[in-house]
Image: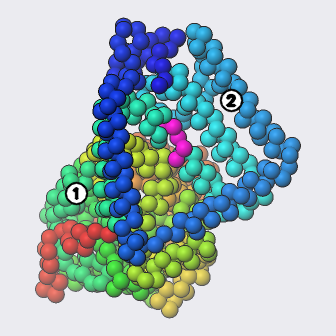
Amino acid sequence: MPDDKSKTGGSQTGNGKAGNGGEPSPYTVHDPDALARNFARMIEQAGRAASEWMRPREAGEKTDDFAEGLTEISKTLSKVTEYWLADPERSLSAQTQLFSRYMDLWNASIRRMAGEQVDPVANPQRGDRRFADPDWQANPFFDFLKQAYLITSGWAGDLVERTEGLDEHTKHKAIFYTQQIINSLSPSNFPNLNPEVLRETLQSDGENLVRGMAMLADDIAAGHGDLKLRQADTSAFMVGRDVANTPGKVVAQNDVCQVIQYEASTKQVLKRPLVIVPPWINKFYILDLNEKKSFIRWCVDQGHSVFVISWVNPDEKQAGKSFEHYAEEGIMATLDVIEDITGACEFNTIGYCVGGTLLAVTLALMARRGDERIKSATLFASQVDFTHAGDLKVFVDEEQIARIEKSMTESGYLEGQKIASAFNMLRSRDLIWPYVVNNYMRGRDPLPFDLLYWNSDSTRMPAANHSFYLRNCYLENRLSQGTMEVGGEKLDLEEVKIPIYNLATREDHIAPAKSAYLGSQFFGGKVTFVLAGSGHIAGVVNHPSTGKYQYWTGGKPVGDLDGWLEKAKETAGSWWPHWHEWIVAQDGETVSAPKSGSRKHKPIENAPGSYVMVKA
Protein backbone atom coordinates (compact mmCIF):
# COMPACT_ATOMS: atom_id res chain seq x y z
CA MET A 1 0.00 0.00 0.00
CA PRO A 2 1.26 3.55 -0.63
CA ASP A 3 2.85 5.32 2.32
CA ASP A 4 0.86 8.37 3.39
CA LYS A 5 3.88 10.15 4.88
CA SER A 6 5.64 12.91 3.03
CA LYS A 7 9.07 14.14 4.04
CA THR A 8 8.05 17.64 3.09
CA GLY A 9 5.72 17.65 6.08
CA GLY A 10 2.64 15.89 7.40
CA SER A 11 0.03 15.27 4.72
CA GLN A 12 -3.61 16.17 5.13
CA THR A 13 -5.74 13.41 3.67
CA GLY A 14 -9.47 13.30 3.22
CA ASN A 15 -9.70 11.65 6.65
CA GLY A 16 -7.37 13.76 8.75
CA LYS A 17 -3.63 13.83 9.34
CA ALA A 18 -1.67 10.64 9.09
CA GLY A 19 1.81 9.76 10.13
CA ASN A 20 2.56 12.58 12.57
CA GLY A 21 0.41 11.92 15.62
CA GLY A 22 0.62 8.15 15.78
CA GLU A 23 -2.71 7.74 14.01
CA PRO A 24 -3.02 4.70 11.73
CA SER A 25 -2.67 5.28 8.01
CA PRO A 26 -6.01 5.39 6.18
CA TYR A 27 -4.42 2.99 3.68
CA THR A 28 -4.43 0.08 6.14
CA VAL A 29 -6.55 -3.07 5.91
CA HIS A 30 -8.62 -3.19 9.10
CA ASP A 31 -10.44 -6.50 8.72
CA PRO A 32 -8.97 -8.87 6.11
CA ASP A 33 -11.79 -11.38 6.52
CA ALA A 34 -14.52 -8.79 5.96
CA LEU A 35 -12.63 -7.42 2.97
CA ALA A 36 -12.36 -10.91 1.46
CA ARG A 37 -16.08 -11.59 2.03
CA ASN A 38 -17.03 -8.32 0.35
CA PHE A 39 -14.75 -9.02 -2.58
CA ALA A 40 -16.65 -12.29 -3.02
CA ARG A 41 -19.98 -10.40 -2.87
CA MET A 42 -18.63 -7.90 -5.40
CA ILE A 43 -17.73 -10.73 -7.78
CA GLU A 44 -21.25 -12.11 -7.35
CA GLN A 45 -22.74 -8.74 -8.33
CA ALA A 46 -20.30 -8.56 -11.25
CA GLY A 47 -21.74 -11.86 -12.42
CA ARG A 48 -25.23 -10.36 -12.25
CA ALA A 49 -24.05 -7.38 -14.28
CA ALA A 50 -22.59 -9.73 -16.90
CA SER A 51 -25.86 -11.68 -16.95
CA GLU A 52 -27.89 -8.51 -17.52
CA TRP A 53 -25.56 -7.62 -20.37
CA MET A 54 -25.83 -11.06 -21.96
CA ARG A 55 -29.59 -11.58 -21.58
CA PRO A 56 -30.86 -9.49 -24.55
CA ARG A 57 -27.98 -10.70 -26.72
CA GLU A 58 -28.72 -14.35 -26.05
CA ALA A 59 -32.38 -13.68 -26.81
CA GLY A 60 -31.45 -12.10 -30.12
CA GLU A 61 -32.95 -8.76 -29.07
CA LYS A 62 -29.70 -6.85 -29.35
CA THR A 63 -26.56 -7.08 -31.43
CA ASP A 64 -23.33 -5.15 -31.05
CA ASP A 65 -21.07 -3.42 -33.52
CA PHE A 66 -17.99 -3.40 -31.28
CA ALA A 67 -15.87 -4.91 -34.03
CA GLU A 68 -16.81 -2.21 -36.53
CA GLY A 69 -16.15 0.51 -33.96
CA LEU A 70 -12.76 -0.90 -33.01
CA THR A 71 -11.87 -1.32 -36.66
CA GLU A 72 -12.67 2.37 -37.25
CA ILE A 73 -10.50 3.41 -34.30
CA SER A 74 -7.63 1.11 -35.35
CA LYS A 75 -7.70 2.34 -38.95
CA THR A 76 -7.60 5.96 -37.81
CA LEU A 77 -4.88 5.65 -35.19
CA SER A 78 -2.75 3.38 -37.40
CA LYS A 79 -2.32 6.35 -39.76
CA VAL A 80 -0.87 8.34 -36.86
CA THR A 81 1.44 5.44 -35.99
CA GLU A 82 2.58 5.11 -39.59
CA TYR A 83 3.61 8.76 -39.69
CA TRP A 84 5.80 8.52 -36.59
CA LEU A 85 7.33 5.13 -37.41
CA ALA A 86 8.04 5.97 -41.04
CA ASP A 87 10.96 8.17 -40.05
CA PRO A 88 13.34 6.64 -37.44
CA GLU A 89 14.76 10.04 -36.54
CA ARG A 90 11.27 11.45 -35.99
CA SER A 91 10.30 8.45 -33.88
CA LEU A 92 13.46 8.64 -31.78
CA SER A 93 12.93 12.36 -31.19
CA ALA A 94 9.38 11.77 -29.94
CA GLN A 95 10.51 8.98 -27.60
CA THR A 96 13.40 11.08 -26.31
CA GLN A 97 11.02 13.91 -25.44
CA LEU A 98 8.86 11.55 -23.39
CA PHE A 99 11.85 9.91 -21.69
CA SER A 100 13.28 13.33 -20.82
CA ARG A 101 10.04 14.34 -19.13
CA TYR A 102 9.99 11.07 -17.19
CA MET A 103 13.54 11.75 -15.98
CA ASP A 104 12.53 15.25 -14.88
CA LEU A 105 9.70 13.74 -12.85
CA TRP A 106 11.95 11.04 -11.38
CA ASN A 107 14.56 13.59 -10.31
CA ALA A 108 11.94 15.89 -8.82
CA SER A 109 10.43 12.98 -6.88
CA ILE A 110 13.83 11.96 -5.48
CA ARG A 111 14.49 15.52 -4.37
CA ARG A 112 11.08 15.70 -2.75
CA MET A 113 11.68 12.47 -0.85
CA ALA A 114 14.94 14.03 0.36
CA GLY A 115 12.99 16.87 1.94
CA GLU A 116 13.28 19.59 -0.70
CA GLN A 117 10.39 21.80 -1.77
CA VAL A 118 9.95 20.96 -5.44
CA ASP A 119 7.62 22.46 -8.03
CA PRO A 120 5.51 19.91 -9.95
CA VAL A 121 6.79 18.86 -13.36
CA ALA A 122 3.22 18.57 -14.65
CA ASN A 123 0.02 20.19 -13.41
CA PRO A 124 -3.62 19.37 -14.22
CA GLN A 125 -5.49 21.79 -16.42
CA ARG A 126 -7.58 24.40 -14.68
CA GLY A 127 -10.98 22.93 -13.84
CA ASP A 128 -9.75 19.31 -13.89
CA ARG A 129 -11.59 17.88 -10.87
CA ARG A 130 -10.18 14.37 -11.17
CA PHE A 131 -7.23 15.24 -8.94
CA ALA A 132 -9.00 17.40 -6.34
CA ASP A 133 -8.39 15.02 -3.43
CA PRO A 134 -5.52 16.40 -1.25
CA ASP A 135 -3.50 13.16 -1.47
CA TRP A 136 -2.97 13.65 -5.21
CA GLN A 137 -0.58 16.41 -4.10
CA ALA A 138 0.39 15.51 -0.53
CA ASN A 139 1.16 11.81 -0.93
CA PRO A 140 4.35 11.23 -2.97
CA PHE A 141 3.07 7.97 -4.49
CA PHE A 142 -0.18 9.44 -5.83
CA ASP A 143 1.53 12.68 -6.84
CA PHE A 144 4.06 10.71 -8.91
CA LEU A 145 1.27 8.65 -10.46
CA LYS A 146 -0.73 11.76 -11.35
CA GLN A 147 2.20 13.57 -12.93
CA ALA A 148 3.30 10.49 -14.89
CA TYR A 149 -0.21 10.26 -16.33
CA LEU A 150 -0.32 13.97 -17.18
CA ILE A 151 3.08 13.79 -18.89
CA THR A 152 2.14 10.69 -20.90
CA SER A 153 -1.32 11.92 -21.89
CA GLY A 154 0.02 15.35 -22.86
CA TRP A 155 2.74 13.74 -24.95
CA ALA A 156 0.28 11.41 -26.71
CA GLY A 157 -2.14 14.24 -27.47
CA ASP A 158 0.65 16.42 -28.79
CA LEU A 159 1.87 13.56 -30.98
CA VAL A 160 -1.50 13.34 -32.72
CA GLU A 161 -1.72 17.11 -33.09
CA ARG A 162 1.68 17.18 -34.81
CA THR A 163 0.92 14.33 -37.19
CA GLU A 164 1.18 15.56 -40.77
CA GLY A 165 -0.37 14.26 -43.97
CA LEU A 166 -3.82 13.50 -42.54
CA ASP A 167 -6.97 14.96 -44.04
CA GLU A 168 -8.93 17.21 -41.69
CA HIS A 169 -11.63 14.63 -40.86
CA THR A 170 -9.16 11.82 -40.14
CA LYS A 171 -7.09 14.08 -37.90
CA HIS A 172 -10.24 15.20 -36.07
CA LYS A 173 -11.15 11.56 -35.45
CA ALA A 174 -7.62 10.71 -34.34
CA ILE A 175 -7.62 13.54 -31.80
CA PHE A 176 -11.06 12.50 -30.54
CA TYR A 177 -10.23 8.79 -30.21
CA THR A 178 -6.92 9.56 -28.52
CA GLN A 179 -8.68 11.81 -26.02
CA GLN A 180 -11.19 9.06 -25.22
CA ILE A 181 -8.32 6.65 -24.50
CA ILE A 182 -6.51 9.26 -22.43
CA ASN A 183 -9.63 10.00 -20.38
CA SER A 184 -10.35 6.32 -19.78
CA LEU A 185 -6.81 5.53 -18.57
CA SER A 186 -6.67 8.23 -15.91
CA PRO A 187 -5.46 6.74 -12.59
CA SER A 188 -8.52 8.33 -10.98
CA ASN A 189 -10.64 5.70 -12.80
CA PHE A 190 -9.02 2.72 -11.01
CA PRO A 191 -10.00 1.81 -7.42
CA ASN A 192 -6.48 0.86 -6.35
CA LEU A 193 -4.92 4.01 -7.86
CA ASN A 194 -7.47 6.60 -6.72
CA PRO A 195 -6.67 7.67 -3.14
CA GLU A 196 -10.25 8.63 -2.33
CA VAL A 197 -11.68 5.32 -3.56
CA LEU A 198 -8.86 3.32 -2.01
CA ARG A 199 -9.45 4.90 1.42
CA GLU A 200 -13.17 4.24 1.21
CA THR A 201 -12.56 0.65 0.12
CA LEU A 202 -10.19 -0.10 3.01
CA GLN A 203 -12.20 1.74 5.64
CA SER A 204 -15.50 0.09 4.65
CA ASP A 205 -13.88 -3.30 4.01
CA GLY A 206 -15.02 -3.14 0.38
CA GLU A 207 -18.69 -2.37 1.04
CA ASN A 208 -18.48 0.48 -1.47
CA LEU A 209 -17.44 -1.91 -4.25
CA VAL A 210 -20.32 -4.25 -3.46
CA ARG A 211 -22.80 -1.38 -3.66
CA GLY A 212 -21.16 -0.07 -6.82
CA MET A 213 -21.27 -3.39 -8.64
CA ALA A 214 -24.93 -3.82 -7.67
CA MET A 215 -25.62 -0.36 -9.12
CA LEU A 216 -23.79 -1.35 -12.29
CA ALA A 217 -25.98 -4.41 -12.67
CA ASP A 218 -29.11 -2.30 -12.09
CA ASP A 219 -28.02 0.27 -14.67
CA ILE A 220 -27.30 -2.37 -17.31
CA ALA A 221 -30.72 -3.88 -16.64
CA ALA A 222 -32.30 -0.41 -16.95
CA GLY A 223 -30.54 0.02 -20.29
CA HIS A 224 -31.83 -3.37 -21.52
CA GLY A 225 -28.33 -4.70 -21.93
CA ASP A 226 -26.51 -1.41 -22.42
CA LEU A 227 -25.17 0.73 -19.61
CA LYS A 228 -27.60 3.53 -18.74
CA LEU A 229 -25.25 5.71 -16.73
CA ARG A 230 -26.94 7.53 -13.87
CA GLN A 231 -25.84 11.16 -13.74
CA ALA A 232 -28.50 12.40 -11.34
CA ASP A 233 -30.90 11.08 -8.73
CA THR A 234 -33.91 10.67 -11.02
CA SER A 235 -36.24 9.88 -8.12
CA ALA A 236 -35.99 13.52 -7.01
CA PHE A 237 -37.71 14.85 -10.13
CA MET A 238 -41.01 14.47 -11.91
CA VAL A 239 -41.76 16.19 -15.20
CA GLY A 240 -44.64 18.61 -14.64
CA ARG A 241 -44.01 18.80 -10.90
CA ASP A 242 -40.34 19.66 -10.33
CA VAL A 243 -39.36 20.54 -13.91
CA ALA A 244 -41.47 21.73 -16.86
CA ASN A 245 -44.01 23.22 -14.46
CA THR A 246 -44.85 26.59 -16.03
CA PRO A 247 -48.69 26.68 -16.28
CA GLY A 248 -50.14 26.08 -19.72
CA LYS A 249 -52.28 23.87 -21.92
CA VAL A 250 -51.70 21.55 -24.84
CA VAL A 251 -53.91 23.03 -27.55
CA ALA A 252 -53.08 20.82 -30.54
CA GLN A 253 -51.23 17.65 -31.46
CA ASN A 254 -50.39 15.45 -34.43
CA ASP A 255 -47.97 12.63 -35.26
CA VAL A 256 -44.98 14.98 -34.99
CA CYS A 257 -45.62 17.29 -32.05
CA GLN A 258 -47.85 18.82 -29.42
CA VAL A 259 -48.40 22.58 -29.25
CA ILE A 260 -48.29 24.10 -25.76
CA GLN A 261 -49.83 27.49 -25.02
CA TYR A 262 -48.59 29.02 -21.76
CA GLU A 263 -50.88 31.01 -19.49
CA ALA A 264 -50.19 34.74 -19.55
CA SER A 265 -49.04 36.34 -16.31
CA THR A 266 -49.66 39.88 -17.58
CA LYS A 267 -52.92 41.50 -18.72
CA GLN A 268 -51.28 42.81 -21.88
CA VAL A 269 -48.97 40.79 -24.12
CA LEU A 270 -46.97 41.54 -27.23
CA LYS A 271 -49.21 41.34 -30.28
CA ARG A 272 -46.80 38.98 -32.00
CA PRO A 273 -46.92 35.56 -30.29
CA LEU A 274 -43.57 33.93 -29.50
CA VAL A 275 -43.12 30.45 -31.00
CA ILE A 276 -40.27 28.34 -29.57
CA VAL A 277 -38.84 25.47 -31.64
CA PRO A 278 -36.71 23.27 -29.35
CA PRO A 279 -34.38 20.52 -30.55
CA TRP A 280 -35.91 17.07 -30.94
CA ILE A 281 -32.61 15.48 -29.94
CA ASN A 282 -33.53 16.52 -26.39
CA LYS A 283 -36.78 17.44 -24.67
CA PHE A 284 -38.05 21.01 -24.66
CA TYR A 285 -38.01 21.53 -20.90
CA ILE A 286 -34.34 22.50 -20.91
CA LEU A 287 -35.99 25.92 -21.34
CA ASP A 288 -38.32 25.27 -18.39
CA LEU A 289 -36.25 23.51 -15.71
CA ASN A 290 -37.58 25.42 -12.71
CA GLU A 291 -38.83 28.87 -11.75
CA LYS A 292 -35.30 30.20 -11.18
CA LYS A 293 -33.97 28.92 -14.51
CA SER A 294 -36.96 28.86 -16.84
CA PHE A 295 -36.60 30.91 -20.00
CA ILE A 296 -40.21 30.10 -20.86
CA ARG A 297 -41.57 31.41 -17.54
CA TRP A 298 -39.35 34.51 -17.81
CA CYS A 299 -40.71 35.25 -21.30
CA VAL A 300 -44.28 34.88 -20.03
CA ASP A 301 -43.50 37.34 -17.23
CA GLN A 302 -42.06 39.83 -19.73
CA GLY A 303 -45.39 39.93 -21.57
CA HIS A 304 -44.80 37.42 -24.35
CA SER A 305 -47.63 35.18 -25.52
CA VAL A 306 -45.58 31.98 -25.51
CA PHE A 307 -46.21 28.83 -27.54
CA VAL A 308 -43.77 25.89 -27.52
CA ILE A 309 -43.49 22.85 -29.76
CA SER A 310 -43.08 19.60 -27.82
CA TRP A 311 -41.77 17.01 -30.27
CA VAL A 312 -42.98 13.42 -30.23
CA ASN A 313 -40.62 10.78 -28.86
CA PRO A 314 -40.82 8.74 -32.07
CA ASP A 315 -41.24 5.04 -32.63
CA GLU A 316 -41.66 2.99 -35.80
CA LYS A 317 -44.75 5.05 -36.80
CA GLN A 318 -42.57 8.11 -37.40
CA ALA A 319 -39.85 6.23 -39.34
CA GLY A 320 -40.62 8.12 -42.56
CA LYS A 321 -40.89 11.59 -41.00
CA SER A 322 -38.13 13.80 -42.40
CA PHE A 323 -37.21 17.50 -42.24
CA GLU A 324 -40.09 18.27 -44.58
CA HIS A 325 -42.61 16.81 -42.13
CA TYR A 326 -41.01 18.47 -39.11
CA ALA A 327 -41.13 21.81 -40.96
CA GLU A 328 -44.68 21.48 -42.28
CA GLU A 329 -46.42 19.36 -39.61
CA GLY A 330 -44.32 20.92 -36.87
CA ILE A 331 -43.51 24.61 -37.31
CA MET A 332 -45.93 25.62 -40.07
CA ALA A 333 -48.86 23.67 -38.59
CA THR A 334 -48.13 25.29 -35.22
CA LEU A 335 -48.38 28.74 -36.82
CA ASP A 336 -51.81 27.77 -38.18
CA VAL A 337 -52.92 26.74 -34.68
CA ILE A 338 -51.67 29.94 -33.05
CA GLU A 339 -53.23 32.07 -35.76
CA ASP A 340 -56.60 30.46 -35.04
CA ILE A 341 -56.26 30.92 -31.26
CA THR A 342 -54.88 34.48 -31.16
CA GLY A 343 -55.95 35.97 -34.46
CA ALA A 344 -52.34 37.01 -35.00
CA CYS A 345 -50.80 36.70 -38.44
CA GLU A 346 -47.29 37.82 -37.50
CA PHE A 347 -44.95 35.84 -35.25
CA ASN A 348 -41.64 36.00 -33.42
CA THR A 349 -39.80 32.67 -33.41
CA ILE A 350 -36.94 31.01 -31.56
CA GLY A 351 -35.01 27.88 -32.56
CA TYR A 352 -32.56 26.11 -30.27
CA CYS A 353 -29.72 23.88 -31.52
CA VAL A 354 -31.06 21.57 -34.26
CA GLY A 355 -34.43 23.30 -33.70
CA GLY A 356 -32.70 26.45 -34.93
CA THR A 357 -31.41 24.61 -37.99
CA LEU A 358 -34.95 23.40 -38.71
CA LEU A 359 -36.29 26.91 -38.17
CA ALA A 360 -33.79 28.28 -40.70
CA VAL A 361 -34.82 25.57 -43.18
CA THR A 362 -38.48 26.45 -42.60
CA LEU A 363 -37.80 30.17 -43.07
CA ALA A 364 -36.16 29.45 -46.42
CA LEU A 365 -39.05 27.16 -47.41
CA MET A 366 -41.65 29.78 -46.41
CA ALA A 367 -39.74 32.49 -48.25
CA ARG A 368 -39.76 30.39 -51.41
CA ARG A 369 -43.54 29.84 -51.00
CA GLY A 370 -44.27 33.48 -50.22
CA ASP A 371 -45.40 32.81 -46.64
CA GLU A 372 -44.43 35.94 -44.66
CA ARG A 373 -46.00 35.22 -41.27
CA ILE A 374 -42.71 34.91 -39.37
CA LYS A 375 -41.38 38.44 -38.80
CA SER A 376 -38.33 37.71 -36.63
CA ALA A 377 -36.20 34.69 -35.81
CA THR A 378 -33.85 34.04 -32.92
CA LEU A 379 -31.32 31.22 -33.11
CA PHE A 380 -29.89 29.75 -29.91
CA ALA A 381 -26.56 27.95 -30.45
CA SER A 382 -27.68 26.86 -33.91
CA GLN A 383 -25.86 26.05 -37.13
CA VAL A 384 -26.86 26.68 -40.73
CA ASP A 385 -23.35 26.16 -42.06
CA PHE A 386 -21.43 23.08 -40.91
CA THR A 387 -17.90 23.89 -42.04
CA HIS A 388 -16.78 24.29 -38.43
CA ALA A 389 -19.39 22.04 -36.88
CA GLY A 390 -17.36 20.89 -33.89
CA ASP A 391 -16.74 17.53 -32.30
CA LEU A 392 -19.96 15.91 -33.51
CA LYS A 393 -18.40 15.80 -37.00
CA VAL A 394 -16.17 13.02 -35.71
CA PHE A 395 -19.19 10.70 -36.00
CA VAL A 396 -20.03 11.76 -39.54
CA ASP A 397 -18.59 10.20 -42.66
CA GLU A 398 -20.04 7.91 -45.30
CA GLU A 399 -19.10 4.69 -43.49
CA GLN A 400 -20.41 5.77 -40.10
CA ILE A 401 -23.67 7.17 -41.51
CA ALA A 402 -24.22 3.94 -43.44
CA ARG A 403 -23.84 1.98 -40.19
CA ILE A 404 -26.31 4.26 -38.40
CA GLU A 405 -28.81 3.93 -41.27
CA LYS A 406 -28.44 0.17 -41.19
CA SER A 407 -29.09 0.10 -37.44
CA MET A 408 -32.27 2.18 -37.94
CA THR A 409 -33.64 -0.07 -40.70
CA GLU A 410 -35.47 -2.56 -38.50
CA SER A 411 -36.80 -0.28 -35.76
CA GLY A 412 -37.35 2.88 -37.80
CA TYR A 413 -35.50 5.05 -35.32
CA LEU A 414 -32.20 5.55 -33.56
CA GLU A 415 -32.19 4.65 -29.87
CA GLY A 416 -32.13 7.65 -27.59
CA GLN A 417 -29.40 6.12 -25.45
CA LYS A 418 -27.03 6.09 -28.43
CA ILE A 419 -27.59 9.80 -28.95
CA ALA A 420 -27.07 10.49 -25.24
CA SER A 421 -23.87 8.43 -25.20
CA ALA A 422 -22.49 10.30 -28.20
CA PHE A 423 -23.09 13.66 -26.52
CA ASN A 424 -21.56 12.41 -23.26
CA MET A 425 -18.47 11.21 -25.11
CA LEU A 426 -17.83 14.74 -26.34
CA ARG A 427 -16.99 15.57 -22.72
CA SER A 428 -16.26 12.14 -21.32
CA ARG A 429 -13.86 13.48 -18.69
CA ASP A 430 -16.72 15.41 -17.08
CA LEU A 431 -19.87 13.56 -18.17
CA ILE A 432 -18.85 9.88 -18.00
CA TRP A 433 -15.87 9.02 -15.82
CA PRO A 434 -16.76 11.03 -12.68
CA TYR A 435 -20.06 9.12 -12.53
CA VAL A 436 -18.35 5.78 -13.15
CA VAL A 437 -16.12 6.52 -10.14
CA ASN A 438 -18.91 7.88 -7.94
CA ASN A 439 -21.50 5.22 -8.79
CA TYR A 440 -19.59 2.01 -9.39
CA MET A 441 -16.45 2.45 -7.28
CA ARG A 442 -17.65 4.55 -4.38
CA GLY A 443 -21.12 3.00 -4.50
CA ARG A 444 -22.84 6.33 -4.05
CA ASP A 445 -26.05 7.55 -5.63
CA PRO A 446 -25.59 10.66 -7.78
CA LEU A 447 -26.95 13.92 -6.41
CA PRO A 448 -30.27 15.37 -7.56
CA PHE A 449 -29.54 17.88 -10.32
CA ASP A 450 -32.28 19.06 -12.68
CA LEU A 451 -29.96 19.73 -15.62
CA LEU A 452 -28.47 16.23 -15.51
CA TYR A 453 -31.93 14.74 -15.00
CA TRP A 454 -32.97 16.44 -18.25
CA ASN A 455 -29.75 15.27 -19.92
CA SER A 456 -30.57 11.66 -19.08
CA ASP A 457 -34.17 11.96 -20.34
CA SER A 458 -33.21 11.05 -23.89
CA THR A 459 -35.30 10.85 -27.04
CA ARG A 460 -35.24 8.68 -30.14
CA MET A 461 -34.54 9.91 -33.68
CA PRO A 462 -36.84 9.07 -36.64
CA ALA A 463 -34.85 7.22 -39.28
CA ALA A 464 -35.68 9.52 -42.21
CA ASN A 465 -35.19 12.71 -40.21
CA HIS A 466 -31.86 11.66 -38.71
CA SER A 467 -30.50 10.40 -42.01
CA PHE A 468 -31.51 13.64 -43.77
CA TYR A 469 -29.89 15.75 -41.04
CA LEU A 470 -26.60 13.87 -41.02
CA ARG A 471 -26.23 13.76 -44.78
CA ASN A 472 -27.57 17.19 -45.80
CA CYS A 473 -26.09 19.17 -42.94
CA TYR A 474 -23.02 17.54 -41.44
CA LEU A 475 -21.78 15.53 -44.41
CA GLU A 476 -22.70 17.67 -47.44
CA ASN A 477 -23.38 21.10 -45.87
CA ARG A 478 -26.19 21.78 -48.34
CA LEU A 479 -28.21 24.45 -46.52
CA SER A 480 -25.67 27.26 -46.66
CA GLN A 481 -24.66 26.28 -50.20
CA GLY A 482 -28.21 26.65 -51.48
CA THR A 483 -28.50 23.04 -52.65
CA MET A 484 -30.77 21.57 -49.95
CA GLU A 485 -34.18 20.43 -51.21
CA VAL A 486 -37.20 20.25 -48.89
CA GLY A 487 -40.83 19.90 -49.90
CA GLY A 488 -39.93 20.04 -53.57
CA GLU A 489 -38.16 23.38 -53.16
CA LYS A 490 -34.46 24.21 -53.46
CA LEU A 491 -33.71 26.41 -50.46
CA ASP A 492 -31.70 29.63 -50.39
CA LEU A 493 -31.03 31.38 -47.07
CA GLU A 494 -30.35 34.60 -49.00
CA GLU A 495 -34.12 34.79 -49.53
CA VAL A 496 -34.67 35.02 -45.76
CA LYS A 497 -34.91 38.81 -45.30
CA ILE A 498 -36.38 39.04 -41.79
CA PRO A 499 -34.34 40.31 -38.78
CA ILE A 500 -32.38 37.55 -37.04
CA TYR A 501 -30.91 37.47 -33.53
CA ASN A 502 -28.12 34.91 -33.71
CA LEU A 503 -26.85 33.83 -30.28
CA ALA A 504 -23.69 31.75 -29.97
CA THR A 505 -21.94 30.61 -26.79
CA ARG A 506 -18.22 30.99 -26.40
CA GLU A 507 -17.39 27.51 -25.03
CA ASP A 508 -19.86 25.55 -27.14
CA HIS A 509 -18.53 22.16 -28.28
CA ILE A 510 -21.73 21.16 -30.11
CA ALA A 511 -22.44 24.30 -32.15
CA PRO A 512 -19.12 26.16 -31.91
CA ALA A 513 -19.27 29.94 -31.83
CA LYS A 514 -17.09 30.05 -34.95
CA SER A 515 -19.68 27.95 -36.78
CA ALA A 516 -22.68 30.00 -35.65
CA TYR A 517 -20.85 33.23 -36.52
CA LEU A 518 -20.09 32.05 -40.05
CA GLY A 519 -23.73 31.04 -40.45
CA SER A 520 -24.79 34.66 -39.87
CA GLN A 521 -23.37 35.61 -43.24
CA PHE A 522 -25.73 33.47 -45.34
CA PHE A 523 -29.02 35.21 -44.48
CA GLY A 524 -30.40 37.92 -46.72
CA GLY A 525 -31.59 40.23 -43.92
CA LYS A 526 -29.99 41.99 -40.97
CA VAL A 527 -28.40 39.65 -38.44
CA THR A 528 -27.65 40.75 -34.88
CA PHE A 529 -24.90 38.48 -33.62
CA VAL A 530 -24.46 38.04 -29.86
CA LEU A 531 -21.85 35.92 -28.12
CA ALA A 532 -22.65 34.64 -24.61
CA GLY A 533 -20.21 33.30 -22.04
CA SER A 534 -20.12 29.60 -21.06
CA GLY A 535 -21.35 26.70 -23.21
CA HIS A 536 -24.19 25.13 -25.18
CA ILE A 537 -26.56 24.88 -22.21
CA ALA A 538 -25.35 27.20 -19.45
CA GLY A 539 -24.71 30.02 -21.90
CA VAL A 540 -28.30 29.86 -23.13
CA VAL A 541 -30.12 28.98 -19.89
CA ASN A 542 -28.79 31.92 -17.87
CA HIS A 543 -31.53 33.66 -15.89
CA PRO A 544 -30.80 37.35 -15.19
CA SER A 545 -31.30 36.79 -11.45
CA THR A 546 -28.12 34.68 -11.27
CA GLY A 547 -25.79 37.47 -12.35
CA LYS A 548 -23.57 34.88 -14.04
CA TYR A 549 -21.37 35.07 -17.13
CA GLN A 550 -21.47 37.85 -19.72
CA TYR A 551 -22.25 38.55 -23.35
CA TRP A 552 -20.70 40.46 -26.21
CA THR A 553 -22.42 42.65 -28.78
CA GLY A 554 -20.87 44.38 -31.75
CA GLY A 555 -21.17 45.33 -35.35
CA LYS A 556 -22.24 43.38 -38.39
CA PRO A 557 -20.94 39.77 -38.35
CA VAL A 558 -18.48 39.96 -41.23
CA GLY A 559 -14.94 38.66 -41.39
CA ASP A 560 -13.90 36.22 -38.67
CA LEU A 561 -15.12 35.84 -35.10
CA ASP A 562 -11.83 36.89 -33.50
CA GLY A 563 -11.84 40.16 -35.40
CA TRP A 564 -15.46 40.82 -34.42
CA LEU A 565 -14.74 40.02 -30.78
CA GLU A 566 -11.82 42.47 -30.60
CA LYS A 567 -14.22 45.35 -31.25
CA ALA A 568 -17.25 43.96 -29.40
CA LYS A 569 -18.70 45.38 -26.20
CA GLU A 570 -18.74 43.07 -23.16
CA THR A 571 -21.70 43.27 -20.76
CA ALA A 572 -21.89 41.40 -17.46
CA GLY A 573 -24.78 39.06 -16.75
CA SER A 574 -27.48 37.45 -18.86
CA TRP A 575 -28.21 38.33 -22.47
CA TRP A 576 -31.96 37.73 -21.97
CA PRO A 577 -32.89 41.40 -21.33
CA HIS A 578 -30.87 42.46 -24.39
CA TRP A 579 -32.82 39.97 -26.51
CA HIS A 580 -36.16 41.16 -25.09
CA GLU A 581 -35.28 44.76 -26.00
CA TRP A 582 -34.42 43.58 -29.51
CA ILE A 583 -37.80 41.84 -29.82
CA VAL A 584 -39.71 44.90 -28.61
CA ALA A 585 -37.76 47.07 -31.04
CA GLN A 586 -39.13 44.96 -33.92
CA ASP A 587 -42.72 45.57 -32.84
CA GLY A 588 -43.72 46.58 -29.31
CA GLU A 589 -47.49 46.72 -29.87
CA THR A 590 -49.48 44.96 -27.15
CA VAL A 591 -52.95 43.38 -26.97
CA SER A 592 -55.06 41.75 -24.28
CA ALA A 593 -53.73 38.35 -23.26
CA PRO A 594 -55.49 35.56 -25.18
CA LYS A 595 -57.37 32.76 -23.48
CA SER A 596 -56.13 29.17 -23.72
CA GLY A 597 -57.25 27.44 -26.89
CA SER A 598 -60.15 28.26 -29.18
CA ARG A 599 -63.39 26.72 -30.38
CA LYS A 600 -61.44 24.77 -33.00
CA HIS A 601 -58.44 24.03 -30.80
CA LYS A 602 -59.80 23.21 -27.38
CA PRO A 603 -57.23 22.49 -24.61
CA ILE A 604 -56.37 18.79 -24.61
CA GLU A 605 -54.41 18.50 -21.36
CA ASN A 606 -52.26 20.51 -19.00
CA ALA A 607 -48.70 21.43 -19.88
CA PRO A 608 -46.17 19.94 -20.29
CA GLY A 609 -48.35 17.40 -22.10
CA SER A 610 -48.05 13.67 -22.64
CA TYR A 611 -45.50 13.61 -25.49
CA VAL A 612 -42.70 14.80 -23.22
CA MET A 613 -43.53 12.07 -20.71
CA VAL A 614 -42.66 9.25 -23.12
CA LYS A 615 -39.32 7.65 -22.21
CA ALA A 616 -36.86 6.45 -24.82
Q: Secondary structure at mark 2?
A: helix
Residue at 22% of width from left, 81% of height from top? 252
Residue 213: percent from the left, percent from the top? 34, 48
Highlighted magenta segment, given as a residue range: 184-188
Residue at 48% of width from left, 51% of height from top? 427
Q: Quadrant of residue 390?
A: bottom right
Residue where numbered disc 2 is placed: 102
User: Left of 401 or right of it: where is 61?
Assistant: left
Circle 1 packing at 10 Å, graded few (<14), some (14-19), many (20+), is many
Q: Quadrant of the C terminus?
A: bottom left
Residue 612: percent from the left, percent from the top? 26, 69
Question: Magenta span: helix, strand or loop, mainly?
Answer: helix
Circle 2 packing at 10 Å, graded few (<14), some (14-19), many (20+), is some
Amino acid at circle 2: Tyr
Amino acid at circle 1: Val
Residue where numbered disc 1 is placed: 243
Asked whether 322 or 315 is in front, the reply is 315
- Above or below, 417 relative to 599: above
Q: Sequence order check: which comes first, mark 2 or mark 1?
A: 2
Give the total of numbered labels. 2
